[in-house]
Image (spheres, helix red, strand yellow):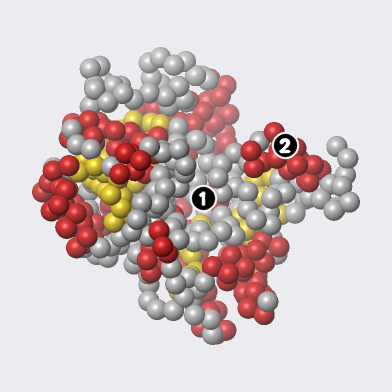
Amino acid sequence: MASSCSGRGVSESTAARARSVMPGGVNSGQRSIPGLEDLVITRARGSRFQDDTGKEYIDFHAAFGPPILGHNDPDVAAAVAHAARTVDLCGVGVTDAEVQLAEVLVDLVPSIEKALLTSTGSEATFHALRVARAATGRRLVVKFQGCYHGWHDSVSLNVISAPGRVGRHDPISAGILPEVLEATLVLPFNDEDAVRRTFEAHGRDIAAVIVEPVPHNVGCLLPTPSFLQTLREATQKHGSVLVFDEVITGFRHDLGGWQRISGVTPDLTTLGKAIANGYPIGAIGGRADLMDMFSSRPGGPAFFAGTYNGAPAVVAAAVATLTKLRNEPVHEHIFGLGGRIRTALRDLYAEIGVPAVVTGYGSIFVTYFMSGGVPRSYEDLLANRGDLFVGYRRRLVKRGVFELPLELKRSHVSYAHTDDDVDRLLEATREAVLETLQF
Ligand code: PMP
């Protein structure tokens, strides 16, 4: 490939080739970032990744969350290599490792009596809503503004909305049948009255409530102490299925998920991301009577399938990841660094006099540039200054520290990050914020 005069050489030509044969040049929405359209990744290890110019980044984006142990963890890589040499995929029966993984999920997550594997989180939430409709014979689903549950139609609305679209149906995609959108009711997160009013009006038609117990798809909205309990009571009273979408919170915040932290047990739980440290996986688990409705059990009326569900290399990654999460002080380490980052950032913004709310939980951190207390709903986040949020991250990336320069995205710490990585993050953040403010 010819080198370009920009100095990016092969990198520019790889990205250009990508754009000519792949729509947008990337394989998922939100991977092509303004200003970083030519980013070509060549290597990822531990707390860092590298692009094809040889530039190294300390990675706090962490692929939206999966590599909780760090990139290319040696134990996970060894387990995957061993599995790949042993069984690739047979599409019949079960392997011992799939059973082991289901046993671990049942053991660790309070709501899970039985579990099934998918290849993505979207498939897990899709099946949760399908089985909820199958079990209740009802039509409606309730979700919350700011929560993301994947790409399928019933949940493809009201994640990040412009102010005028909040509270109205705001699809994230064209091509969705209006009747599917109408079957999803959208409420403000943490609004217990809205939940009660909605159940009074529509309770007998509501099949399921699906919620990120901590909406991390807009950074971090912590639930008030009684909100999740209110969801539990309303769904129980009206015979609806409560689904906790723990694709982000599961295993990252606690081995038992947010449900163990909050003490509120849903009927179904969806998982993904951190289970397999970067390998493609999702899981759905919950009450045995609901799970037994899936067609994986003969006669189960809710069709469930997937060629790659439980693929041996992926399951090996998951078993190795969960073993390490259980046996090593992973949470102590990532919570320690996460806490250090949040405290230092609060001190930084107080010192330089920028209105900022630094929040998060455990290994997740995010700074909103706004006044006031901790935000409780998406509506509160409309006060965030997007120019600063994205601006300082762009300058951070230039300095080799990667936080995704997109509005409201959270950042993650992994087991591979060190105090030195955090020192570098804090130093670069100070420089990047000061530079953005002068701009
Ligand atoms: N639920 C939540 C809470 C998520 O954050 C995501 C992905 N960001 C999904 C579901 C969908 O998972 P996947 O991208 O693996 O389909």
Structural crowding at the residue carrying mark 1, measured as other residues with C-alpha within 10 Å and reported as few (<14), some (14–19) or many (≥20): some
Which residue is nearer to you in this view: 266 or 323?
Answer: 266
Q: Secondary structure at mark 1?
A: helix
Residue at 23% across, 17% down: 299
Location of residue 92 by image quarter: top left
The quadrant of the picture occupied by the N terminus is: top right
Q: Which mark is residue 20?
A: 2
Give the image location of residue 229, x and y in percent.
19, 57
- Asked if the residue at tag 1 contacts the one at tag 2, i.e. Cβ–Cβ closer than 8 Å, the answer is no
For badge 1, the amino acid type reads: Phe
In the figure, 51 relative to 388: above or below?
Answer: above
Give the image location of residue 274, x and y in percent.
45, 45
- The residue that disc 1 covers is 64
For badge 2, the amino acid type reads: Ser
The yes-or-no answer for disc 1 within 8 Å of ligand 1 is yes
Horizontal arrangement in the rendering, residue 147 relative to residue 24 (left or right): left
Residue 90 shows in the view: yes
Earlier sequence position, callout 2 versus callout 1: 2
Residue at 40% across, 52% down: 170
Give the image location of residue 265, x and y in percent.
22, 48
Residue at 53% across, 81% down: 354
Question: Mark 2 and mark 1: span between their CA atoms?
Answer: 26 Å
Furthest-left residue in this view: 237
In the figure, 169 relative to 295: above or below?
Answer: below
The yes-or-no answer for disc 2 within 8 Å of ligand 1 is no
Horizontal arrangement in the rendering, residue 208 relative to residue 417 (left or right): left
Horizontal arrangement in the rendering, residue 2 relative to residue 30 (left or right): right
Residue 261 shows in the view: no
Location of residue 176 by image quarter: top left
Which residue is nearer to you in this view: 226 or 101?
Answer: 226
